[in-house]
């Protein structure tokens, strides 16, 4: 199975992991995990925003990998781009956690362009 397919699984799990540290607080109420007051500001708010963006980015990435491979794109190239996407998402999450807006936007843009490159890879093969 191509590495890029495994990257789809990783990309699906990353949103869950991006919010996990915010749930480690003693104030977190697992009986009411969506309490808006808990997620209102600071690190918790940024972690939740990173999670939401991860869920938003996932479908395009997953479809891009499936289309790229399914339409005859070079699997080695798609694998490299998929790993790059995962690395960029990790940078994105870290930037969100640490409140670094400009590098976060750069990582998001690079990740989006990586997804477009995966999707269009069959054209260039």
Image (cartoon, helix red, strand yellow):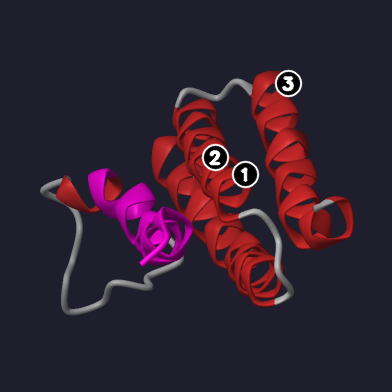
Q: In which quarter of the image is residue 94?
A: top left
Disc 3 versus disc 2: distance between alpha carbons? 25 Å
Q: Quadrant of residue 73?
A: bottom right
Give the residue at mark 2: 80
Q: Do the residues labelled 2 and 1 touch (CB within 8 Å)?
A: yes
Q: Is mark 1 on a helix, strand or loop?
A: helix
Q: Is mark 3 on a helix, strand or loop?
A: helix
What residue is at 55 percent from the left and 66 percent from the top?
55
Q: Do the residues labelled 3 and 1 touch (CB within 8 Å)?
A: no
Disc 3 versus disc 1: distance between alpha carbons? 28 Å
What residue is at 41 percent from the left and 36 percent from the top?
43
Mark 1 crowdedness (10 Å alpha carbons): few <14, some 14-19, many ≥20 = some
97 versus 115 height, above or below: above
Observer able to see residue 40: no
Give the residue at mark 3: 102
What residue is at 57 percent from the left and 55 percent from the top?
75
What residue is at 48 percent from the left and 34 percent from the top?
87
Mark 3 crowdedness (10 Å alpha carbons): few <14, some 14-19, many ≥20 = few
29 or 66: nearer the eye? 66
Q: Main secondary structure of the magenta part?
A: helix
Q: Return the mark for residue 77.
A: 1
Observer able to see residue 74: yes
The tag earlier along the polypeptide, 3 or 2, is 2
Quarter in which the N terminus is drawn = bottom left
Foreground mark, 3 or 1?
Answer: 1
Q: What element carries label 2?
A: helix
Highlighted range, magenta: 1-21
């Amino acid at each position: 199975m191509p590495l890029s397919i495994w990257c789809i699984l990783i990309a699906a799990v990353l949103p869950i992991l991006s919010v996990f540290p915010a749930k480690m607080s003693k104030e977190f109420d697992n009986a009411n995990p969506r309490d808006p007051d808990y997620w209102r500001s600071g690190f918790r708010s940024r972690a939740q925003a990173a999670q939401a963006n991860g869920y938003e980015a996932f479908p395009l990435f997953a479809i891009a990998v499936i289309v790229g491979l399914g339409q005859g794109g070079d699997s080695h190239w798609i694998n490299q781009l998929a790993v790059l996407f995962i690395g960029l998402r990790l940078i994105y999450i870290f930037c969100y956690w640490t409140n670094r807006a400009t590098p976060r936007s750069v990582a998001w843009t690079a990740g989006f362009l990586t997804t477009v490159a995966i999707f269009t890879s069959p054209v260039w093969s």
